[in-house]
Image (cartoon, grey):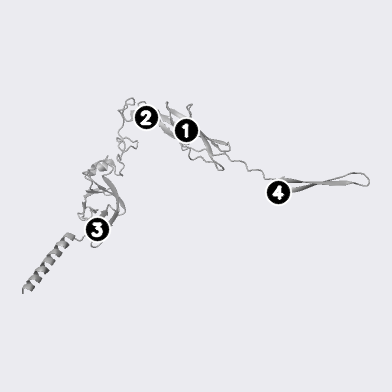
Amino acid sequence: AAGTYTVNLTVTDNGVPVLSDTTSTTVNVTEKPAAKKPPVAKTTGPYHGLTNQNITFDGSASYDGDGSIVNYTWDFGDGSVGYGVKPTHVYMVAGTFDVLLTVKDNDGLTNTTKTTATIELDSDGDGWSDEEEQRYGFDPNNSSSMPEDTDDDHVPDIVDSDDDNDGLPDDVETLVGSDPQNETNATNVTVADSNNYLVDTDNDGVYDTFYNPDTDTKTTVAKDQRGRYLIDFDGDGTVDYVYDPASGSVNSYGEVTPGAEIPWLLVAVVVIFAVIAITVVLYFRKKI
């Protein structure tokens, strides 16, 4: 154990009489320093990309439990080396490359991890691989020939069932009359515990159609004076629910706050006529 100890040494001879002598010294004992822990290298791989395209590598998840990381060295597997937490690299040829990240901490200890980068050939640099362009019928050597991708999800419109990512399938948008490439002309509303949609079919910024995908029913909606939408849920010609776009709430038509539908213009007219009538009556009474 660590501490300060006194060590005594006594020597004795074999003469007659027996003689002896003793000396002492002090010894200090310290604990052995704990072994330094190496850092841990981590990446966000595996990575995917195209030739002639910047690919960002990320080693920010790496850590050192008893210090700090002072160096990040990347071997990109194609003979190139990079440094830093988030370096970028461009591959000139297609293939699958072993990527090594080595981190060094402030004690000089290192750790290495391996991931891969799968690179596809993009001959014309248009952001679509040659294989994808050939699959969808486009010229991989012409940068002006590429699949149309309205929502930039890298799924061509010709095979994307929801081009604008508004939650309403393209075929349904065509059915109800909305634009399948405009993400702002439909909104999801929950009515009677089911997902439904309010749709702006004429792109004027006002929803005019309610669509119930469970029953494949569409009905016309109207707005009240407060900007709320009146919904005929079952297609019987009567209003069943009220949707408030300001709060996103849906209430049964009969649950609308009492007094919310008071015709204030009519009330104002009645009050004005009442005031005029009272004034006339008082005038003639004074004449009498």
Taking the image as shown, residue 143 lies to the left or right of residue 10, namely left
Say which quarter of the image contains residue 125: top left
108 lies above or below 275 = above
SS label for mark 4: strand
Residue 45 at x, y percent in the picture:
46, 36
Are dots 3 and 4 in contact, CB under 8 Å?
no
Q: Earlier in the sequence, mark 1 or mark 4?
A: 4
Residue that protrudes farthest toward the right in the picture = 16
Q: Amino acid at mark 3?
A: Tyr
Per the image, the residue denoted by label 4 is 3
Labelled disc at residue 129: 2
Q: Amino acid at mark 1?
A: Thr
Are dots 4 and 2 in contact, CB under 8 Å?
no
Q: CA distance from mark 3 to mark 4?
A: 84 Å
Residue that protrudes farthest toward the top in the picture = 141
Per the image, the residue denoted by label 1 is 116
Labelled disc at residue 253: 3
Taking the image as shown, residue 116 lies to the left or right of residue 141, namely right
Q: CA distance from mark 2 to mark 3?
A: 53 Å
Q: CA distance from mark 1 to mark 2?
A: 18 Å
Is the C terminus in the top left, top right, bottom left or bottom right quadrant? bottom left
Q: Amino acid at mark 4?
A: Gly
Residue located at (53% from left, 38% from top): 69
Residue located at (41% from left, 31% from top): 54
Judge whether residue 1 can be spotted in this image.
no
Between circles 4 and 2, the one closer to the viewer is: 4
Q: CA distance from mark 1 to mark 4?
A: 53 Å
